[in-house]
């Protein structure tokens, strides 16, 4: 994961952002993150100026996704149930975003489906590694944080760059890249898990 290298560098920033939300239940923050991801999927589908709102909504979703676990640790109430809910809602969030993109005027559904396979198998390989070897794997070429940054930038670029290249939109090419890099990441994690078993 590209951004995983900077996790420690931004930890203090995430802590500062999380502190005003310590009065919330961390699970509530996970649900808020999911709701804004769902809204962003709707904005992707609506297109035009809503593409900018999709980016804004995804930024809010990403912030809440980053601080839910931090709040749990600050309050010393981190639990397996919270971790399970967080990762489950992350998958629903990914699905909502991809569905919105696939139904929009900017993407072909089969590229969106390809991207979704990369996203899901990346996640599956990481959590299955934990199931069989005891340690979750966040490594690889394209982790969730990387995808969120891409999905935040993508609608803005698409809004200002409407032209197609060889009959395909900017969004189409991003989906292809996510599909390829996601499946490569899943293979990387799988190979590490296989060696650790």
Image (tube, helix red, strand yellow):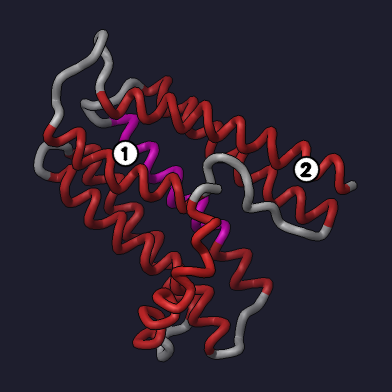
Q: Give above or below for 146 relative to 15.
A: above
Residue 148 x %, y %: 40, 49
Dot 1: element:
helix
Disc number placed over residue 100 in the picture, else none: 1
Compared across the picture, whether 129 is left or right of 32 comes to right
Percent x, y for residue 181? 53, 32
Q: Is residue 75 magenta?
A: no
For the residues labelled 2 and 1, the Cα–Cα distance comes to 33 Å
- Mark 2 or mark 1, which is nearer to you? 2
**Residue tagged 2:** 192
Q: Residue at x 40, y 60 (%)?
A: 34
The region drawn magenta spans 87-103
* Neighbour tally class for label 2: few under 14, some 14-19, many 20 plus, Cα within 10 Å: some
Q: Give the residue at x 17% y 51%.
A: 53
Q: Residue at x 77, y 37 (%)?
A: 191
In the displayed structure, does residue 137 sit left or right of residue 172? right
First in sequence: mark 2 vs mark 1? 1
Kind of element beneath mark 2: helix
Is 95 colored magenta in this rendering?
yes
In terms of depth relative to the viewer, which is nearer, 112 or 160?
160
Q: Secondary structure of the magenta portion, mostly?
A: helix
Q: Residue at x 56, y 40 (%)?
A: 141
Q: Could you classify mark 1 by the number of other residues whose Cα lies within 10 Å: few (under 14), some (14-19), or many (20 or more)?
A: many
């Amino acid at each position: 994961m590209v951004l995983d290298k900077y996790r420690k560098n931004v930890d203090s920033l995430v802590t500062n952002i999380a502190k005003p939300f310590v009065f919330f239940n961390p699970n509530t923050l996970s649900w808020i993150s999911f709701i804004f991801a769902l809204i962003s999927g709707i904005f992707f589908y609506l297109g035009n100026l809503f593409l900018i709102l999709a980016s804004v909504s995804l930024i809010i979703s990403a912030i809440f996704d980053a601080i839910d676990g931090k709040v749990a640790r600050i309050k010393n109430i981190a639990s397996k149930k919270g971790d399970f809910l967080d990762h489950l809602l992350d998958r629903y969030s990914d699905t909502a975003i991809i569905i919105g993109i696939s139904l929009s005027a900017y993407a072909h559904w089969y590229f969106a489906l390809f991207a979704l396979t990369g996203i899901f198998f990346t996640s599956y390989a990481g959590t299955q590694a934990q199931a069989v070897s005891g340690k979750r794997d966040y490594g690889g070429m394209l982790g969730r944080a990387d995808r969120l940054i891409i999905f935040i930038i993508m609608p803005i670029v698409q809004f200002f760059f409407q032209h197609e290249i060889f009959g395909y939109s900017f969004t189409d090419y991003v989906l292809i890249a996510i599909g390829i890099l996601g499946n490569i990441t899943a293979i990387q994690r799988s190979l590490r898990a296989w060696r650790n078993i």
